[in-house]
Image (tube, rainbow, N blue to C red):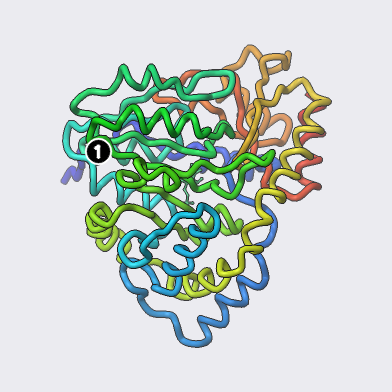
Amino acid sequence: MNYNILSKLPDVGTTIFTTMSKMANENGAINLSQGFPDFEVSTDLIELISSYMKKGLNQYAPMSGVPHLSNAISKMIANTRNVMVNSENEITVTSGATEAIYDIITATVQKNDEVILFDPAYDCYDPAIRLSGGTPIHIKLTQPDFSIDWEVVKNHINPRTKMIMINTPHNPTGAVLSQKDLNSLEDLIKDTNILVLSDEVYEHIIFDDKAHESVLKYPNLRQRSAAVYSFGKTFHATGWKMGYVVAPSWWTIEIRKVHQFVTFCSNTPVQYALADFIAEPENYEYVPRLYQEKRNYFTNLVKESNFKPVKCSGTYFQLLSYNNVEELCHLNDMEAAEKLTKKYGLASIPISVFYGDRQDDKLLRFCFAKGKETLKKATEILCKI
Ligand SMILES: Cc1ncc(COP(=O)(O)O)c(C=O)c1O
């Protein structure tokens, strides 16, 4: 017998995050590659989960989320964005933002639909579009600030354009969209049926007193947008895989149809605990300060090296250019990341993997969601090269 399947994603291999983390482990390297924090989750939150488990809340949750949590999310959105969201029919709790993105795309994209995304783009977008038979249209962000050129976007819009995917604050570049950007998007699609998927998983990780520009704040966008969030990012608990989608009720109905057959529901005791936890705004209001301090600490130390930081206004990632690093500048970014890991003991992510055409800008992404000691050791390595 020769069992075989025709791959739906023939060009997709193991993700770069797995590859680089494995390389980091094998070489005993400091791992600033994958985006996970190395400090502890709040003990209050852990105790809340444990108490709900002990109370026996260990069976399936309602498909769209525990109402206690949906209500708390709705209040948090009212508090942070001054927007009213209906907790019953506009919020769906998912097993991480990745599931939310997959559910939205699967519910929405039909064969031959085009979906615009901006490169460098988070790696789960493109495959999900293709699995639904859609065509990803990759538009490059404009350097050096990785902004969106809305004129270029306009030139790519046609009757097949189904959706535009935005991500702010942006992984991997740390760029954030401004009010002007959201107004341009509003203008651009106002006479079309184009939908928006807005990946806002880093909504609370934004710096220098910048306001997070959520699609939820723009009524003309909100009526046609699905916005995606991740508790894993906000509460440094990426392993819990807890997120949610906010979308208008007509779209939520379809998103839930997919969600119910992908996971059906998400972790019950964690949902109860998160509901209690986010009811206290101070539990999330400190997050921008925490990461801004880490960004400043890391970039100040990097100044002593030949690596050049790209301006980072949000997320917990810092891009560094190695164009001026004699030992690395002749290498492509994959080779540079490999050398940095194997020879110097510091793992990062090469940015070319986030481009549809694998463009190489000689940039590496470093995750600074780490303790000071780790960041110090990492920058000592960078200063040595
Ligand atoms: C931009 C972006 N979107 C979505 C996700 C996925 O989030 P989650 O871990 O909640 O699935 C990530 C995680 O790194 C991300 O960086």
Secondary structure under badge 1?
loop
Q: Nearer the viewer, residue 248 or 330?
A: 248
Image quadrant occupied by the C terminus:
top right
Q: Nearer the viewer, residue 83 or 169?
A: 83
Residue that appears at 61% across and 63% down:
281
Up/down of 19 relative to 73, above or below: above
Residue that appears at 63% across and 45% down:
25
Residue that appears at 72% across and 14% down:
324
Task: Say few, some or many: other residues with alpha carbon within 10 Å of mark 1 (under 14 / 14 to 19 / 20 or more).
Answer: few
Q: Amino acid at mark 1?
A: Lys
Q: Pinpoint residue 344: horizontal percent, then vertical percent.
A: 73, 31
Q: Is residue 170 in sight in this rendering?
A: yes
Q: Pinpoint residue 266: horizontal percent, then vertical percent.
A: 39, 66
Q: Is residue 36 left or right of residue 325?
A: left
Q: Which residue is mark 1?
A: 8
Residue that appears at 47% across and 23% down:
141
Q: Pinpoint residue 308: horizontal percent, then vertical percent.
A: 71, 22
Q: Nearer the viewer, residue 213 or 273?
A: 213
Examine the image and state in which quarter residue 278 appears.
bottom right
Q: Is residue 26 in sight in this rendering?
A: no
Q: Pinpoint residue 296: horizontal percent, then vertical percent.
A: 76, 38
